Image (cartoon, grey):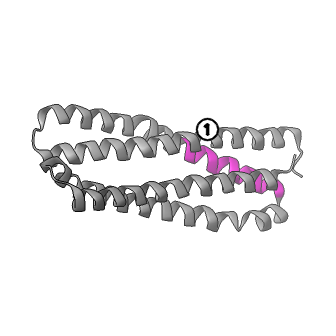
Amino acid sequence: MDILKTTTDWAKAELLSNSLFALFGVMFVAASLLFWSKGETEMARALVLPMLVAGVLMLILGGGLFYGTWKSSTGFAPAYAEDAASFVASEIERVDRTMAQYTTAVFQVMPLMIAVAALLIVFLQGPGWRAALITAIVFLSLIKLIDSNANARLESYKATLVSAVSGRSLN
């Protein structure tokens, strides 16, 4: 089992996943511009600002995650060449930390925020509030969808790392 190839493949999948944030960011910005230019109803005009904010946040998130993953992936080969066992141990530790963060943020906090936003739509009647809450629900749902897939990849990646350690096949 080639751990370095597995790690590089995982990083490539993460780069693609991170690019999805940017793609959705562009889609939010495009939707915002379309609502601004073509929107005739009060609700359509109310969606302009929340969609623009969500798009910019997604672009920032995608760009930051892409850069971070790309930057760390360039250090995989030298770290692995220096000490394969230490590299695998540090990767397992990093994966555990990331999965713990996903457990809290993606699988507990975000569903709660989505539920609260959905409930508030019933009580807040203005189009600005509804537009912001609908945009928040879509924004958080997209993040949850992308991060759920990233978490599944991390689980698989960790299983590969652990099996390499237990089998001592670090090449």
Indicate the quadrant where residue 151 lies. top right
Residue 113 percent location from the top left of the image: 31, 38
Relative to 129, 17 lies left or right: right
SS category of the residue bearing label 1: helix
Nearest the viewer among 152 and 48 is: 48
Instruction: Identify the residue at image location x=73%, y=53%.
Output: 9
Residue 107 percent location from the top left of the image: 45, 35
* Residue marked by disc 1: 152
Residue 50 percent location from the top left of the image: 25, 54
Q: Is 87 rendered above or below residue 116?
A: below
Q: Is residue 40 magenta?
A: no
Instruction: Identify the residue at image location x=25%, y=33%.
Output: 118
Nearest the viewer among 28 and 39 is: 39
Residue 41 percent location from the top left of the image: 14, 49
Relative to 39, 155 lies left or right: right
- What residue range appears in magenta? 84-99
Instruction: Identify the residue at image location x=44%, y=46%.
Output: 143
Q: How many marks can you see?
A: 1
Q: Is 4 rendered above or below residue 102?
A: below
Nearest the viewer among 122 and 116 is: 122
Indicate the quadrant where residue 137 lies. top left
Outermost residue toward the left in this view: 126
Tell me which amino acid carries mark 1.
Ala
Q: Tell me the quarter of the image containing the N terminus.
A: top right
Q: Secondary structure of the magenta portion, mostly?
A: helix
Within 10 Å of disc 1 (Cα), the crowding (few <14, some 14-19, many 20+) is few
Instruction: Identify the residue at image location x=43%, y=44%.
Output: 142
Q: Is residue 97 magenta?
A: yes
